[in-house]
Image: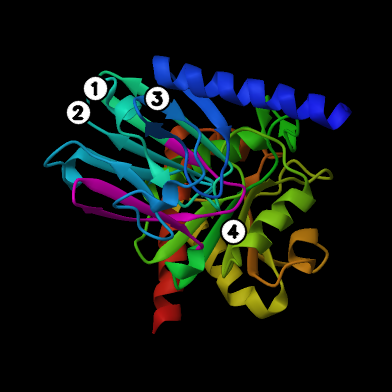
Amino acid sequence: MKKTAGFLIFFILAFSSMIYFIFSGNDISIGFARERGVFNQTDGEYTDNSSLAERSGDRAGYVTIPLPDDFGEENVTVSKNHSGRRITVNISPVEQDFYHKNLFSGEMKRITNIKYGFEEGTASIVFESEEIVEPVTEIRDDKLFIKFVSPRDIYDHILVIDPGHGGDDSGTTAYGKAEKDIVNGVVEKLHKTLSSDDIGIYYTREKDTNLSDEERLSFISSVSADLVVSIHVGADSKSRTTTGTTALSLSADRALAEAFSSNIAEKCSEKDDGWKDGTNISLMRNLNSKTIMLELGYITNKKEALLMSEDAYMEKASEALTETIKEYFANENN
């Protein structure tokens, strides 16, 4: 009896979401993911239908999104968030009710949630996944076909940037500066400077949130990263005069760690404090990926704490990181 009542409540909530989506077009979750299909139209009525894979024009393994006549790539943008778990499709210009009458369908196995929104002639369809996915797209016959695949299906190399601390974990604080704020600032710049068509680039966190070591390890392992760069700042509880950039790694990766440390020091006009053994770091002990932990400078040194908090420093640090990462993967390709 309890199971029946629970199912009835779920059905009412899901149906209410569907009706709201159909008539408002606002940004709203439109129900749980289905193996195939979202909505169908039968005899002028909208129904939840699991047989949409048979709809004319669908392609096995793809989501099919109808497009207005003569739409091309210039009318469609497909983007992913930095964690690779949310794909956004923007389509414009379209009429507000276009996707009330022309519903998308197809393969939804990797999708856990879907949202739809409309604003100023642009329709936005957001696909969310618990997995890290990449979109493969094709426009043909007035339809956008989109397939969600694993990063390894697209890239030969995969990089994970791990911003240290976050949320209620501020890291080390000194002189009114917090470690997480410096890290967040550098990573925000890195989003703009670091891009590649050949390397899959992902971030363990997008926002100022606190992740456990287990969550970081799980993310990195799930994407099978070739290189992990974890970003922190240094601290010395015994001295206020210690300065310089530092890179920690396993001994086998010492040369790469030294390259990161020296490049950041040179770019940011800091002292290069060199390499340190990272054997005791949980992130390195429990990963098969090549892992570098950077300490950008010593926040316990007042001069460096103030320097690292400057926008110009963050910009230079992100440039040094970008150059070192690209040089490493270029050498890997040779």
Count neighbours of disc 4 (C-alpha within 10 A) and say few if under 14, some if 14 to 19, many if 20 or more: many
Q: What amino acid type should be assigned to the residue bearing mark 3?
A: Glu
Tell me, yes or no, whether the highlighted magenta stretch contains residue 46.
no
Label 4 vs 2, first from the N-terminus: 2
* Mark 1 touches mark 4? (CB < 8 Å): no
In the image, 116: left or right of 57? right
Label 3 vs 4, first from the N-terminus: 3
Magenta stretch, main secondary structure class: strand
Tell me where residue 56 appears, x and y as whole percent: 30, 50
In the image, 10: left or right of 162? right
**Which residue has dot 1 on it?**
121
Rendered residue at 46%/69% (across/down): 153
* Mark 1 touches mark 3? (CB < 8 Å): no
The stretch of residues the image draws in magenta is 126-150
Tell me where residue 131 appears, x and y as whole percent: 60, 53
Q: Quadrant of residue 302?
A: top right
Q: Which residue lies furthest to the left in this view?
A: 70
**Which residue has dot 3 on it?**
45
* Mark 2 touches mark 3? (CB < 8 Å): no
Q: What amino acid type should be assigned to the residue bearing mark 4?
A: Val
Helix, strand or loop under label 4: strand
Q: What amino acid type should be assigned to the residue bearing mark 1?
A: Gly
**Which residue has dot 4 on it?**
229
In the image, 236: left or right of 60? right
Helix, strand or loop under label 3: strand
**Nearer-the-camera pick, 158 or 138:** 138
